[in-house]
Amino acid sequence: MQERDSYNMDGHKLMWHLDRVSQWQAGERVAPLHVDMGISAGCNMACTYCYGVIQGRTGFGTDIKGRFNMPEEAILRFFKDAKDIGIRSIALIGEGENTLNPALCKSVDYAKGIGLDLGLATNGIRIPRDPVELESLLTGLTWLRINISAGTKEAFEKIHQVPQYDRVLDNIDRMVKAKKKYGYPCTIGLQMVMTKENFDQVVPLAELGNQLDADYFVIKPCSDTSDYKLDSPKEEYIDNWDVFMEAKKFSKPGYEVIPKIVKLGNLGHKDYNVCFGTQFLIAVSGTGNVFPCGHWFDVRQEEFLMGNIIEQSFKEIFESERYWEVQQRVQAVNVNKDCESNCRQHYLNRFLSDINGQPKDLKEPDFTPQHVNFI
């Protein structure tokens, strides 16, 4: 049996939100529990595995053209709407690098003030050097995750295509030391996205996370297109299982190495036919567009665009018939042909497909994972 990590990352947390699940089972229109959101549409890296690059997005790497930062007022209005509607967490993990938006710290402070759980994924280049701004992030965020997919300088520059290895490591070190010195509550983790190019970096990264005293290091397979444009090494995951076991040896008290075994072992295949997960987890792009999930940001937009939070309130979007028409349209999609593999809703879909139409008596487990609102 796979050992459970304390964050339940290799799974889902819907069992701790059975009030909303029960409403969905009864056929009610339910508010999402979680939103993946971008507040910037550009990035200062050009990672070789980036799903956004293959969708034709601009503003990556050193090219500043095409970058767009969501206005502060739109972010704060969305946060308030989200809280009022019943959304329990938001992760700033949109298609761009959200630390590029100057409204980030104020937005984090606002979310903290209204009791909205907020997480941030970043490439680690633009971590604030100002102590007040750093305190804002490490007291207002539930977690901050650095996406780093290579453990050596040479491999880092090959995968992320920028010469920022030393700066990123220094920023991680600063955050960890500040957290320990001042007792900041934010969880600081590292995440690796694997392709064939960086498979040899699993163990070096696990060791690096140990040395940096991060809280965790999570290893996830690349979410690839149905025709494998990103060249994710599906069979290699199983053929080289000992690599993940070797990486786990670097775990220690306060630091977990977490391979996503379920996703690593499924060869990118989905063992369900319908996507119900977008009922509970939706996505907002850095330009404010609302979609059932990030896959549709630049694919078949006219079919799956629900609205734009810069142009109107999210409450209006959520209450519109368009929102629910699109949610229904998602359920007609061929999940193994028209979607990316190992998507954000994958764990949710396996569970929801199992209980759909079934009179199962669900009970909350006798343990509670960390970050329970991040489903």
Image (spheres, grey):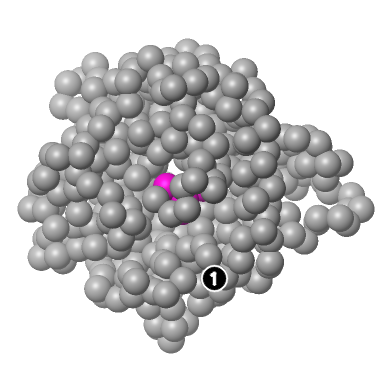
Whether 294 is among the magenta residues is: yes
Question: From the viewer's perspective, is residue 165 above or below residue 1?
Answer: above
Q: Is residue 215 left or right of residue 314?
A: left
Whether 217 is among the magenta residues is: no
In depth, the one of 52 and 172 nearer the eye is 52
Question: From the viewer's perspective, is residue 294 above or below residue 271?
Answer: above
Residue lying furthest left: 163
Which residue shows up at 34% across the image and 71% down it? 229
Quarter where residue 204 is shown: bottom left
Which residue shows up at 27% across the image and 29% down it? 69
Q: Quadrant of the N terminus?
A: bottom right
The residue type indicated by label 1 comes to Lys
Q: Which residues are magenta?
A: 293-297
Would residue 19 be visible to someone looking at this image? Answer: yes
Which residue shows up at 68% across the image and 66% down it? 273
Name the main secondary structure of what is drawn in magenta: helix
The residue pinned by badge 1 equals 337
